[in-house]
Amino acid sequence: MAQSAETQEPLNVTEELLKWTNSTISTMMLGEAEEVRDIARDVLKIFGEYSITDFIGPLKIFKKFGSYEQRIDAIFNKYDPIIEKVIKKRQEIVNKRRSGEIKEGEENVVFLDTLLEIAQDETMEIKITKEQIKGLVVDFFSAGTDSTAVATEWTLAELINNPRVLNKAREEVESVVGKDRLVEESDVQNLPYIRAIVKEAFRLHPPLPVVKRKCTEECEINGYVIPEGALILFNVWQVGRDPKYWEKPLEFRPERFLENSSEGEAASIDLRGQHFQLLPFGSGRRMCPGANLATAGMATLLASIIQCFDLQVPGAHGQILKGDDAKVSMEERPGLTVPRAHNLICVPLARAAKLISS
Ligand code: HEM
């Protein structure tokens, strides 16, 4: 973004956000961020589709010949050797740490190290295999990267289209953090308006619009009998826009989540899965384990972008659009996550050269 601000070249913010989530999550999980970059996109693309053989029973015998199944095999063949290589490298580090060759604090402990240690622990009641470790790595990767990038992009798009909210957020960041240092994650607890912006973006644009459950026993809800075994799809997206639960639901108005404010009619609603009108991270035992990580990371990144840059919207001929013309499209694209239909392209304008260079 800093480079693009210097050259005044348009920047594909969508791609940059995906690079950010990829490198953050893979560094935390695997200790590196190189070859695993495209796993999430490839895996999610195929998750969002379905195989006709799963729905028409007699076709099951053709399963292994279908193009869907063949593409799953291709993804496996592409990424399995990469994950194998990373596991081998981390296993060596775990062994060296154990033998004392690597001292405490010399090498960061990453999520994969912990899984490998658990796998080797003879006292564990439940054994975890290498295949399961690979599955968990891909699971966290595909669950965490695209969703966080998509959510951050929607929030930036809302800020571009709502200059009033952007200015208010900037005032908050400048009054709490000042102009002499870059915002840090520990500042977020003192930035209620930024946190409210994140919530409001999740309400209107939950990256995973549907949460699934299987009914374990027959029950009745509002006069409808739900049979045992039925697959229930809970439409988080629709409930987030339902006028029964939200005042002026289509307006982007973070104030609704502000505590101690006359406008904060929804201030008591949080993202922890207990308020069913706002469930971007699901609810209950299978609720997203990355909710805190994602919201804290998003709030910090948004606050630092707000502090350092103005995101200008270029027109079809590269000219910078102004006023009401400087709006970005809010059209959605279908998929397992719901991203914006078009890449977010901006020309960043630096506001705080000193902070950017720091
Ligand atoms: C804005 C970002 C994110 C959103 C909107 C999101 C949303 C969700 C949702 C709706 C579920 C299903 C919950 C349910 O069925 O009740 C889920 C599951 C999951 N998420 Fe996230 N997530 C995000 C970020 C992350 C991150 C950063 C990680 C980890 C690094 C992560 C890891 C997972 C995992 C492992 C599951 C499966 C949990 C299980 O099945 O028990 N997510 N997420």
Image (spheres, rainbow, N blue to C red):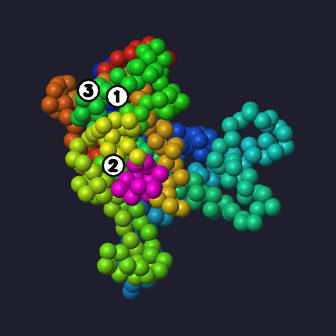
Q: Is residue 271 magenta?
A: yes
| Image position, residue 270 (x, y; %) | 43, 48
> From what the image shows, is residue 351 above or below residue 53?
above
Q: Which mark is residue 169?
A: 1
Q: Which mark is residue 66?
A: none
Q: Quadrant of residue 108?
A: top right
| Residue corresponding to mark 2 | 203
Amino acid type at mark 3: Gln
Give left or right: position of 305 versus 320.
Answer: right
Point 45% across, 55% down: residue: 273
Distance of label 2 from label 3 (alpha carbons)? 25 Å
Amino acid type at mark 1: Ala
Q: Is mark 2 on a helix, strand or loop?
A: helix
Q: Identify the mark nearer the N-term, 1 or 3.
A: 1
| Image position, residue 119 (x, y; %) | 73, 58
How many marks overall? 3
Q: What stretch is highlighted in magenta?
A: 269-282
| Image position, residue 53 (x, y; %) | 39, 77
Residue 200 can be seen, yes or no? no
| Residue corresponding to mark 3 | 312
Q: Is the magenta stretch mostly helix, strand or loop?
A: loop
